[in-house]
Amino acid sequence: PVEELVAEQPKGIILSGGPSSVYAEGAPGLDPKIFEAGIPILGICYGHQLMAHLLGGEVAPGGQREYGHTNVEVIDPDLLLKDVASPCQTWMSHGDLVQQAPVAAMADTDRHLYGVQFHPEVQHTPCGPQILHNFLYRACGCTGSWHPAAFIKQTIAQLRQRIGDDRVLCGISGGVDSAVVASLLDRAIGDQLTAMFIDHGLLRQNEAAQVIATLGPRLGNRFVAVDASQQFLQRLQGVTDPEQKRSIIGETFIRTFEAQAEMLGEFRYIAHGTLYPDVIESGGGSTATIKTHHNVGGLPEDMRWENLEPLRRLFKDEVREIGTQLGLPEEIVNRQPFPGPGLAVRIVGEVTAERLEIVRAADAILHQELQAAGLSERLAQSFAIFADLQSVGVMGDERTYAYPVILRAVTTSDYMTADWARIPDEVLASIASRIVNEVAGVNRVLYDITSKPPATIEWE
Ligand code: XMP
């Protein structure tokens, strides 16, 4: 209800994009009275169409779906497009269009109502930050007072208050998210924290050893490492469906935690490094479920601990800033994200010990070669994927019938959209030749040249 929204005293409202068409049954809508409430509103993609629809415009299917880069020409910058160079590159992802105005942006400056057909919030709209800045600072009167230091202080205080004298078990993956959660808890509650690293056997080469060597000394006897690789492999036997893999891994994680926790005494809370993109992409709210991130949707409902998710409202770049402020080592803060279900979602088909060996060895070669070429820092993520399909090859005059390895490397800062990385041919050539020569069972190397959307970063 409009009254409830207004009572929250928002400085502005952003109507986000979404998978529906405004005419679809059950499509998200809102009371048009909101447009008279004096609150600046920015509609993005679906939000832009919804505004046009509710304000008397006509929205119709665009005929052709428009995905990817589109250049927008700024004819009248008005407030929203102020200081945006023309033409500006934008990222589109939609089917429907606002009919009467075959335009990429619209404004009613008197009522501070704005709409854009493209996505200013993704990295592949370089002028997006300026547009959001214009909306937030010029239309809404925001001042930008969020800082990592303020977040740390506030979160520590909130955690202390919520946890009281209880104990918290924090899952550690070795990545930046869970390390930041553990550090916040370390500062907030000290000895009431136990951090547990479960090696599910789905990690990259030498990763488990590295995690133990880095975090063990920092957390001392509050750090527990468990090797559960055999249990995970057993439960994944015969499973090929990506969502089923995720749910088995999520469940096995918790069961392992529970079994280990029995030995460590009573805990009231379990802490996770859930980020906002995990929440969105797991279908939080009314977005479509793309994939269930194992630290969100894969958790069994009968879990006996209360959840603590202090990073639930943050994006990766913000978490990295916080990690740096907390004094975490550079190799953790800037480490490439790695999915919770690990290599299981980088093996298309059944997960077996042999396939894990293949994908690990190929992944290690990829990283060595990228490092040697000085490319690692420029890539947000780079990894190898094993695919359960065989093809014919010839090696040393012998016929081979073996598996391909697929290489994926992307650039992005928000992980909601991504572009495939333009790796020089000669680097790809040496990676491919090393993989085929050094990894038994592989006779082909493919490079994935799809952006997100329409693909996702991981293959499953
Ligand atoms: P996608 O594949 O959805 O990935 O484009 C976006 C980012 O999320 C990571 N990812 C996961 N992280 N649990 C996680 O903690 C998961 O189940 C999961 N699945 C994907 C992925 O590596 C990328 O950085």
Image (cartoon, grey):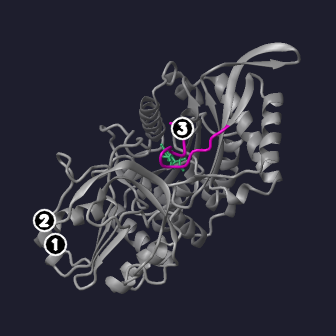
Is residue 228 at all visible to an observer of this figure? no
Name the residue: 20% across, 74% down: 8
Q: Nearer the viewer, residue 206 or 364?
A: 364
Looking at the image, residue 71 sits to the left or right of residue 199; the answer is left
Q: Is residue 155 magenta?
A: no
Residue 457 colored in magenta in the image: yes
Q: Sort mark 3 into few (<14), some (14-19) or many (20+) by Cα contacts within 10 Å.
A: some
As helix, strand or loop, the secondary structure at mark 1 comes to helix
Mark 3 within 8 Å of ligand 1, using the beta carbon: yes
Which residues lie in the magenta part? Answer: 447-460
Callout 2, which amino acid? Asp
Helix, strand, or loop for circle 3? loop
Which corner quadrant holds the N terminus? bottom left
Q: How would you rate the neighbour count of disc 2 (Cα within 10 Å): few for under 14, some for 14-19, many for 20 or more?
A: few
Image mark for residue 31: 2
Q: Is residue 327 left or right of residue 77?
A: right
Q: Is residue 235 above or below residue 274?
A: above
